[in-house]
């Protein structure tokens, strides 16, 4: 393992003004998204949709990495250029989702464990050969009455650390994603408590597995009220609580933190990121690795229609640019009107 090289890749993924486009929806998830706009989830439609996102002119100035799904990493542009090559040539580092999904954790009702470790060493070798230089694994932590259990946090952290160690052995930067889910009616305080416990469990396991923290990117949730919380915290409170939690639980050696959007609207996710980056000097780059918050407006504008391909690209470009400004702490809500 060459830690210096891993560190350089991690820094390039979330360098100043750059963030990550999460386009790694598995087949069931992309079908759900396509159902929402009445488009058929055929292999060609999925390829064309991803091509629309990846070839949006100018977005490469704001996107440092793109997370692909197994089907997508094997697909090409209409001109026959394999997607990973197309992206890497433009400086948008190709990455790959390697977990195989979150399944019920036996004996722990309501809790999930992420699978995908079997055969991972060989799969990583293959993906590296295809041009992937980073990977992603997502652990899912639900909040509810009496959950998460300490065991669930530990089991997911252990799997994340085993994945991360295998990635680094293969010279691939692991994105470590422990996602505390926003569904429910819990308060921002409860989210902070669970996020802190999840991060502590993750860093304890990463250390135990001898993972080089300089060679990872952390992808956490923001500390935020649940979608159905009776009184939801405002943007300033979300930004403050998230920074307080990260500063107390994420070691300074980690080069970059790239948030997931988790169901926030596109504008909320951008505003929260910008507010945090305005709150003084931080030990790590604080950026984005959004799926829905980057893609939802593009998906809506495209609507599965070839004639609206350019409109979809324009929408993706706009979100990429505004999130880049948010990474620099320079985004204002007023920019929404004229950032096309
Ligand atoms: C893009 O969605 C990713 C894949 O989801 P599935 O494995 O469920 O198909 C997802 O892991 C995503 O990368 C992160 O959750 C961040 O996405 P959001 O939409 O929360 O920013």
Image: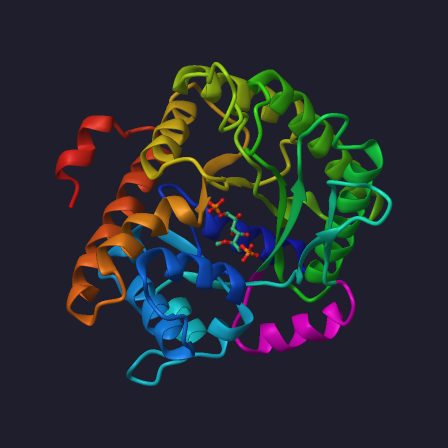
State left or right for residue 272 relative to residue 242: left
State left or right for residue 229 relative to residue 321: right
Question: How far across and down, in percent of the image, does residue 314 sit?
Answer: 19, 54
Farthest residue to the bottom: give it: 80
Quick one: 284 or 84, which is closer to the camera?
84
State left or right for residue 39 relative to residue 133: left
When asked about the image quadrant of residue 274, the answer is top left
- Name the residue located 65 percent from the left edge and 64 percent from the top edge: 171
Residue 53 visible at all: yes
Quick one: 253 or 243, which is closer to the camera?
243
- Judge whether residue 111 is colored magenta: no
- Name the residue located 12 percent from the left edge and 38 percent from the top edge: 338
- Judge whether residue 118 is colored magenta: yes
Q: Which residues are magenta?
A: 117-134
Quick one: 48 or 27, which is closer to the camera?
27
In the figure, 125 relative to 301: above or below?
Answer: below
Count of marks, rendered view: 0
When asked about the image quadrant of residue 127, the answer is bottom right
- Name the residue located 60 percent from the left edge and 26 percent from the top edge: 246
Question: How far across and down, in percent of the image, does residue 218 sit?
Answer: 59, 42
Farthest residue to the left: give it: 338
Question: How far across and down, in percent of the image, does residue 135 sit?
Answer: 59, 60
Residue 1 visible at all: no
In the figure, 101 relative to 336: above or below?
Answer: below
| Rendering colour mode | rainbow
Quick one: 210 or 249, which is closer to the camera?
249
- Name the residue located 66 percent from the left edge and 54 percent from the top edge: 3
In the figure, 59 relative to 191: above or below?
Answer: below
In the figure, 230 relative to 206: above or below?
Answer: above
Q: Which image quarter holds the N terminus?
A: bottom right
Question: How far across and down, in percent of the image, does residue 304 sit?
Answer: 27, 66
């Amino acid at each position: 393992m060459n830690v210096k090289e891993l560190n350089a890749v991690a820094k390039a993924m979330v360098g100043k003004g750059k963030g990550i486009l999460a386009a790694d929806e598995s087949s069931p998830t992309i079908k759900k998204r396509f159902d929402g706009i009445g488009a058929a989830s055929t292999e060609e439609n999925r390829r064309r949709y991803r091509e629309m996102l990846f070839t949006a002119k100018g977005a490469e100035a704001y996107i440092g990495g793109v997370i692909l799904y197994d089907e997508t990493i094997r697909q090409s542009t209409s001109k026959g250029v394999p997607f990973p090559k197309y992206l890497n040539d433009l400086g948008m580092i190709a990455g790959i989702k390697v977990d195989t999904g979150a399944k019920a954790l036996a004996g722990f009702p309501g809790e999930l464990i992420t699978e995908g470790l079997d055969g991972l060493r060989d799969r990583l070798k293959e993906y590296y050969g295809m041009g992937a230089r980073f990977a992603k694994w997502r652990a899912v932590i639900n909040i509810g009455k009496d959950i998460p259990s300490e065991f669930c946090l530990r089991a997911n952290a252990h799997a994340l650390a085993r994945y991360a160690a295998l990635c680094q052995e293969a010279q691939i930067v692991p994105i470590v994603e422990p996602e505390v889910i926003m569904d429910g009616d819990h308060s921002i305080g409860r989210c902070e408590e669970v996020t802190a416990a999840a991060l502590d469990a993750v860093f304890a396991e990463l250390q135990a597995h001898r993972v080089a923290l300089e060679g990872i990117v952390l992808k956490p949730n923001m500390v935020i009220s649940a979608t159905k919380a009776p009184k939801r915290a405002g943007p300033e409170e979300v930004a403050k609580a998230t920074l307080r939690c990260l500063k107390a639980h994420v070691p300074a050696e980690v080069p970059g933190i790239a948030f997931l959007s988790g169901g926030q609207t596109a504008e909320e996710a951008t505003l929260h990121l910008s507010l945090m980056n305005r709150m003084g000097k931080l030990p790590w780059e604080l950026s984005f690795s959004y799926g829905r918050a980057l893609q939802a407006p593009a998906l809506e504008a495209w609507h599965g229609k070839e004639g609206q391909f350019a409109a979809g690209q324009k929408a993706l470009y706009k979100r990429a640019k505004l999130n880049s400004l948010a990474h620099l702490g320079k985004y204002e809500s007023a920019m929404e009107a004229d950032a096309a």
